[in-house]
Image (cartoon, rainbow, N blue to C red):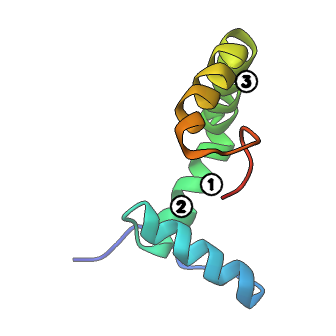
Amino acid sequence: MTSTKKQTQVRLDPDVLDAGKGAAAARGLDFNKYVERLIVEDTTGARAAGMTAAQRLIEEHGSFLDDLEQQLDAPYGRPHPGAAA
C-alpha cells in the first residue's frame, strides 16, 4: 500500500528535537504525527481558537481559579500560588 503523504527533512537543534519527542510521547503520538498535528492546528486556526478560549476563561474566572488554587495548596504550605514546585 502506498502512502499519499510526502516526506520532508527538518533540521532542529538537539534540545528542540528532544523536547518535541518528549511532548509527542506525553500525548501518545509518534514525533511525525505530533509535528503534523502542530502544523494543522496552526494553519487551520484551531490553535488560535483554543488560545482565545483559554484567555477568555482566565479573564472571566481567573480570580476564582486563583482562590481555588490557594485553598487547595493551603494544606501543603505553598506560599505562592502558581509557583513552580
Q: Is residue 30 left or right of residue 61?
A: left
Dot 1, crowdedness within 10 Å: few (<14), some or many (≥20)? few
Count the numbered circles shown: 3
User: Residue 17 is drawn in which quadrant?
Assistant: bottom right
Can you tell which quarter of the image residue 73 is in?
Answer: top right
What whole-number distance in Å separates the C-alpha atoms at marks 1 and 2?
A: 5 Å
Q: In which quadrant will I find the N terminus?
A: bottom left
Q: In 3D space, how far apart are the residues under numbered discs 2 and 3 (Cα atoms)?
A: 25 Å
Q: Nearer the viewer, residue 11 or 28?
A: 28
Please state which amino acid type lies under the numbered disc 3. Gln
**What residue did someone put label 3 on?**
55
On the image, numbered disc 1 is attached to which residue? 39
Q: Nearer the viewer, residue 28 or 80?
A: 80
2 w.r.t. 44: above or below:
below
Pointer 1 with pointer 2, Cβ within 8 A: yes
**Residue positioned 57% across, 26% down in the render:** 71
Is 51 left or right of 72, judged from the image as shown?
Answer: right
Say which residue label 2 marks. Answer: 36
Q: Is residue 9 above or below residue 49?
A: below
Q: Residue at horizontal 72%, vertical 15%? A: 63
The C terminus sits in image quarter: bottom right
Whether residue 5 is visible here, answered yes or no, is: no
Q: Earlier in the sequence, mark 2 or mark 3?
A: 2
Question: Residue 25's image quarter?
Answer: bottom left
Q: Is residue 19 above or below residue 58?
A: below
